[in-house]
Amino acid sequence: MPFAEMDAMELRVECQQRVNEMTMENSMRGWILPFILILLCTWATPVQAWMWEVGDEELAEVTGEGFSSFTLEDDVARAYFNITASTYTEIDSLKMGYYHDGTSYGWDQNWTGVSLGSPTEDLVCKGLYLEAGFSSISDPANRQLDYLKFGTPSMTGPVSANFISFSGQIKDPSGVDIYNGHRLSPGQMTIHTNNSNFEVTLDANAGWQVYWDNATVTTP
């Protein structure tokens, strides 16, 4: 069913990836599919779709340019999409990166009762990008994928959840860390951003990391 016909449907993201005796680097291939599913579910906006007839004269006035760009520099492949995404989406549970980190088994990200946007304010992202960072990209025998990254240079709006486990960094408008660490337990909070950089990274060594800047955090 097209995303445009998903009005009033509940989105549920449950990504479970278990890694036992494998290292983080060797497990990256198994995480690529859950990563893609998260991106699709996260940015799907419940909307209505209509069809109407467009005349030749009206169609001739429609133009478009600069939708996307693709670069490969310094072993980093990057795709940038010049689009604006606006959403109010609720997710029951969002989990990423279950493995043994040297201390214990657990989730890098374990969020429940997630709300992207609110009933009164959409979460708006202007520009979206995907990155893949490699080592020795020009050497097929030694080439390896170091990280995958999804983000936006401009996010505005609230994200609320019970952050049972959080790995990454949140900076306030002055650049001071609000949270910075691995598998922290901030609990229930709302992160509000204003034209902020946002990134989700799957790193071969550090696991799933989330980054916000220019953010304010409120708790119950």
Image: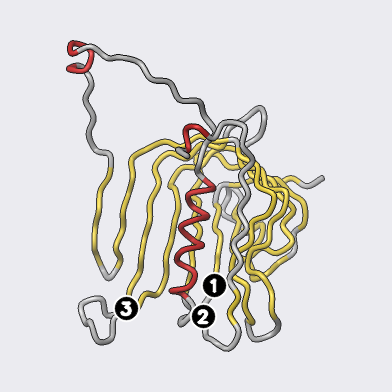
Q: In which quarter of the image is residue 104?
A: bottom right
Relative to 199, is 52 above or below? above
User: Which mark, residue 139?
Assistant: none
- Residue occupying the far right of the picture: 220
Q: Say which amino acid is labelled 2.
A: Met
Q: What residue sits right under mark 2 in the picture?
A: 24
Inter-mark Cα distance, 3 to 2: 16 Å
Q: What residue type is labelled 3?
A: Ser
Give SS at disc 2.
loop
**Dot 2, how many residues are within 10 Å of its Cα: few (below 14), some (14-19), or many (20+)?**
many
Q: Where is residue 82 in the image (x, y as percent from the top left)?
A: 33, 40
Camera-side residue of 191 and 33: 33
Residue shown at 63%/49% (left/top)? 12
Q: Nearer the viewer, mark 3 or mark 2?
A: 2
Q: Which mark is residue 135?
A: 3
Q: What residue type is labelled 1?
A: Gly
The C terminus lies in which quarter of the figure?
Answer: top right
92 left or right, relative to 206: right
Residue 28's x, y, as percent?
46, 74
Estimate the x, y position of residue 62 in percent, counting from the top left: 23, 21
> How many angstroms separate mark 1 from mark 2 (CA)?
7 Å
Quarter location, residue 216:
top right
Q: Name the N-terminal-most of marks 1 and 2.
A: 2
Above or below, 107 relative to 126: below
How dense is the environment of label 3, judged by Cα within 10 Å: few (below 14), some, or many (20 and up)?
A: some
Where does the image place residue 115, in percent across and percent down from the top left?
66, 43
Dot 1 corresponds to which residue? 207
Q: Residue at x 58, y 32 (%)?
A: 122
Measure how far apart labels 1 and 3 are at the Cα level: 17 Å
Please tell me which residue lies in front, 139 or 53: 53
Q: Is mark 3 on a helix, strand or loop?
A: strand
